[in-house]
Amino acid sequence: MSLLKRLFGRSSDAPTLPAAAPSVEFDGFTVRATPYPEAGQFQLCGVISKEIGGVVKEHRFVRADRFTDMDTAVEMTFTKARLIIAQSGGRLFD
């Protein structure tokens, strides 16, 4: 029966996604955390965006880091995005 549950139903230990991706503003950029389930954990993933000349530019990033809970994955996504912005700044969308 366990095999049938895995094939046709949700496993109780499978990570669940939030209804909406949380976002924060940082140094003129908008950072949206978009971690996704991978191998029973949450993969660090996010989107950095900024309006430049009336056009919204986006930079999606994925890192190898995985976390057991969504809250930690979101927090670490924001931390990594701040680092990317600090290192790249305006060159992020070149």
Image (tube, rainbow, N blue to C red):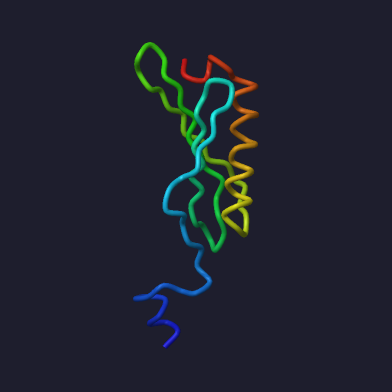
The residue lying furthest to the bottom in this view is: 1
Q: Is residue 1 left or right of residue 40?
A: left
In the image, residue 64 sits, relative to residue 42, either above or below, namely above
Residue 75 appears at what percent x and percent y? 62, 44
In the image, residue 89 sits, relative to residue 34, either above or below, namely above
Residue 30 appears at what percent x and percent y? 50, 29
Q: Is residue 48 left or right of residue 73?
A: left
Residue placed at 58% from the left, 21% from the top?
27
Residue 13 appears at what percent x and percent y? 53, 71
Q: Nearer the viewer, residue 25 or 64?
A: 25
Q: Is residue 50 left or right of residue 41?
A: left
In the image, residue 35 sits, relative to residue 88, either above or below, namely below
The number of discs equals 0
Residue placed at 51% from the left, 42% from the top?
33
Quarter of the picture holding the N terminus: bottom left
Residue 9 appears at what percent x and percent y? 37, 75
The residue lying furthest to the top in this view is: 53
